[in-house]
Amino acid sequence: MPLDQSFVGRSYPPTAPYQVGREKVREFATAIGATDPLHFDPEAAKAAGYPDVVAPPTFPIVLTMAALKVIVLDPDLGVDYSRVVHGDQRFSYNRPVVAGDELVVVNHIEEIMTRAGNDFLTTRQEVRTTADELVATVWHKTVVRGESA
Amino acid sequence: MRFEQSQVLPEQIFQVTRADLVRYAGASGDFNPIHWSERFATSVGLPGVIAHGMFTMALAGQAVAVWAGTGDAIVDFGVRFTRPVPVPDTDEGTDISFTAVVKAADADFATLELTAVCRGEKVLAQARAKVKQF
């Protein structure tokens, strides 16, 4: 069944604040094989003008993937989660995420499209500090494979 | 490094094993069993355990960091996931190769177009990173 088009343009309230921890940044950087001291050493980060260690570029996914569940698990929208595939992903940064940031995610549904029996759901997520500074904007395209696809 | 228009950047190859997927699952919070359970992955029609798309994208970001010489260069980063990256349960796992061409460059920014290949097939499309020039 196609997704409910009336969800296009819908926005959601900010998620609960997420505290970016120094060890979490190090753990994520280690997991992706990152080596730049900016991700591990607060002194190196300070020398480059940051208040604390710098998260690698895709780190916001830790928050935004969790926040996306609010949408894809909304029974009224009708996504069959077992048929979900990750289509596209984009991040646009005002600045890198750094340890000590307290971040919220604001979800928006930008587009819902059906093509060849598959549904495409495009979300835009603003990653903001609790002081309302926009840190990054994140687009995620979810593909819901049709029954015949 | 400073990027120049049309510059071809040297290939980087990343080895990916099941242990890497487990570590990434923990670090990212994405515990979808298609990324660690052969039984589950095959039951939903996959050839076997596959890498997180976001892990492939993170490795692409790491490749950019190496080319740029710093981990904070990227200001815009987008990819399309076109094919899964199967990761066999062997000591070697699999390899993903990254190459890139500089599509545009000025004094402040450069745009890199990346190619990611696993077992002879492109696993990303429209993979672009806009980076600060240092």
Image: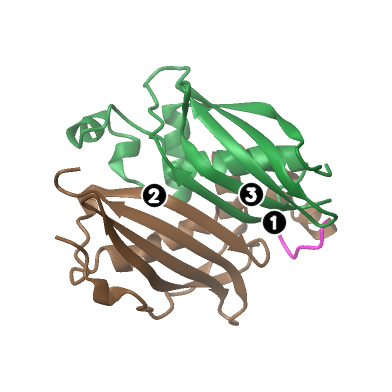
Chain colours: A brown, B green
Decide whether residue A26 is among the magenta residues: no
Q: Callout 2: 10 Å neighbours few (<14), some, many (20+)?
A: some
Residue B51: image x %, image y %?
A: 41, 35
Q: Indicate the amino acid at tag 2.
A: Gly
- Reading the image, the residue beneath label 2 is A87
Residue B31: image x %, image y %?
A: 35, 46
Q: Is residue B29 visible?
A: no
Quadrant where the N terminus of chain B lies?
A: top right
- Circle 2 SS class: strand
Q: Indicate the amino acid at tag 1.
A: Val
Q: Is residue B80 left or right of residue B101?
A: left
Instruction: Name the residue rendered at 28%, 75% in the picture.
Output: A7
Instruction: Give the vertical position of A123 relative to A146 (above or below).
Output: below
Rendered image: mark on residue B129: 3
Residue B54: image x %, image y %?
A: 47, 45
Q: Earlier in the sequence, mark 1 or mark 2?
A: 1
Disc 1 and disc 2: Cα gap in Å? Answer: 30 Å
Instruction: Give the vertical position of A10 relative to B92 (above or below).
Output: below
Q: Is residue B59 left or right of residue A35?
A: left
Task: Give the label, 1 or 2, closer to the camera.
Answer: 2
Q: Nearer the viewer, residue A37 or A90?
A: A90
Disc 3 and disc 2: Cα gap in Å? Answer: 17 Å
Q: Callout 1: 10 Å neighbours few (<14), some, many (20+)?
A: many
* Discs 3 and 2 share one subunit: no
Q: Nearer the viewer, residue A47 or B13?
A: B13
Q: Callout 3: 10 Å neighbours few (<14), some, many (20+)?
A: many
Q: Is residue A62 left or right of residue B14?
A: left
- Circle 1 SS class: loop
Magenta span of residues: A48-53
Instruction: Name the residue rendered at 40%, 70% in the picture.
Output: A110
